Amino acid sequence: MRKVLALLLVFGIAATFGAIDAAAQSDSASGFQILKQYFIQGDWRFMSFVLVCLILGLAFCIERIITLNLATTNTDKLMSRIDDRLVEGDLEGAMEVCKSTAGPTASVLYEGLRNAPNGPEAVEKAITSYGSVQMGLLEKGLVWISLFIAIAPMLGFMGTVIGMIQAFDRIEAVGDLSPSVVAGGIKVALLTTVFGLVVAIILQIFYNYIVSKIDGIVNKMEDASVGLVDLLARNNIFK
């Protein structure tokens, strides 16, 4: 996963700067050129940090989405295949079904089947313990996405404060409160705030989608775990 994340990060940075170069070579006015113009006007020193938050945040989001999609399992089909093996009394065959199926649900069920000879209490304990491990793996990287969601608007607000300070410095130096004196600093302040909030909003949407995806996987995992205990009891696997 680290290699995937690194590749996504490199790709995101290359794509971003490639798009900027392409836009710079184009003579026609476009939405991206306007966005780039505002980005430069908002003081690149602060806007670059906001852009880095966006790139890194999207890299983590894309990595999580890909991982969670690969982790999604057809629970009903998996339980049906396990039931077919247990009806025949083939516990090893049921374990092989879980081992050959990708995803956290199959891994949790495998641990439950592995502890079936020790009784239902052992199965439930194994499922609970290993389920917590799988839950942690599913939520891996979310703390970084949350960090970028929080940092992006903070960087924007920092630019806002510094822009206002610059505006007041100009007023103090010139000794005049004309709009032309303070317009530059205020514009920088507003642009950094807007870009920081836009980045936070984009990442928050992805974050909520990822959390909902994790909740769906966890719910299916819990249902399958309860169903496994019933299957083991119904097929007299417990000794």
Image (spheres, rainbow, N blue to C red):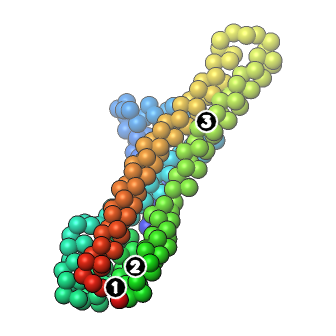
Tag 3: Cα neighbours inside 10 Å, few (<14), some, or many (≥20)?
A: many
Which label is found at residue 67? none
Q: Pointer 2: residues within 10 angstroms few (<14), some, or many (20+)?
A: some
Return the x and y of residue 115 as percentages of the image width and height: 41, 84
Q: Which residue is mark 2?
A: 120
Mark 3 or 1: in front is: 1
Q: Earlier in the sequence, mark 3 or mark 1?
A: 3
Q: Residue at x 30, y 69 (%)?
A: 227
Q: Nearer the viewer, residue 111 or 54?
A: 111
Contact, CB < 8 Å: mark 2 with mark 1?
Answer: yes
Work out how far the residue at label 2 is from the one at label 1, CA to CA, in angstroms: 7 Å
Residue at the disc numbered 1: 238
The local secondary structure at tag 2 comes to: helix
Front residue of this view, candidates 51 and 58: 58
Tell me if residue 93 comes above or below residue 134 in the rendering: below
| Residue 22, placed above or below residue 184 | below
In the picture, which quadrant includes the C terminus?
bottom left
Please say whether residue 38 is visible from this viewpoint: yes
- The disc, 2 or 1, on the residue closer to the chain's N-terminal end is 2
Q: How much space separates mark 3 and mark 2, taking CA atoms? A: 55 Å
Query: In the rendering, at what x and y percent does residue 95 appear?
Result: 31, 84
Q: At x 54% / y 45%, what residue is drawn? A: 149
Q: Position of residue 228 (x, y in %)?
A: 31, 73
Give the residue number, with chain letter if any, for mark 3: 156
Residue 179 placement: quadrant: top right
Percent position of residue 150, x then y: 59, 44
**Vertical arrangement, residue 18 with respect to residue 196, above or below:** below
